[in-house]
Amino acid sequence: MPKFMDVHHGMNGITADQLKQAHGADLAIEQEEGVHFEKAWADPESGTVYCLSEAPSAEAVQRIHERAGHRADEVHPVPLTV
């Protein structure tokens, strides 16, 4: 299944607990779109959050994030991994 890295901006000051809650909201409904969110990272100072997922499409990733309440600003395919 294809992998995607999505990026959220404007989450300045996000805490570890808030990141865990947002990731949990995605995990709770991810199966409805055939998505699996593998990991999330955050830089509270810049307000940037990154999520790595496997999904049938970028649109499926975005639909889950929108329903969970935190639409991604960017969703990028990750076709190569080493």
Image (tube, rainbow, N blue to C red):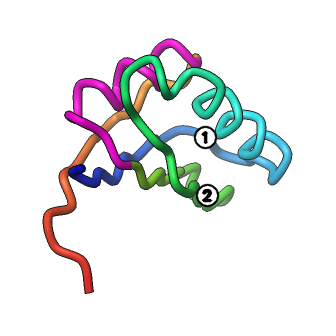
Q: Is residue 62 magenta?
A: yes
Tell me the amino acid under the disc marked 1: Met
Q: Nearer the viewer, residue 18 or 31?
A: 31
Q: Disc 1 on helix, strand or loop?
A: loop
Q: Nearer the viewer, residue 82 or 16?
A: 82
Alpha-carbon neighbours of circle 1 within 10 Å: few (<14), some, or many (≥20)?
A: some
Q: Residue furthest right?
A: 17
Query: Picture coordinates of residue 27 (x, y %)?
Result: 61, 34
Query: Picture coordinates of residue 30 (x, y %)?
Result: 50, 28
Query: Picture coordinates of residue 25 (x, y %)?
Result: 67, 27
| Residue 42: image tag | 2
Residue matched to label 1: 11
Q: Which residues are magenta?
A: 54-68
Q: Is residue 50 magenta?
A: no
State the quadrant of the C terminus.
bottom left
- Residue 62's image quarter? top left
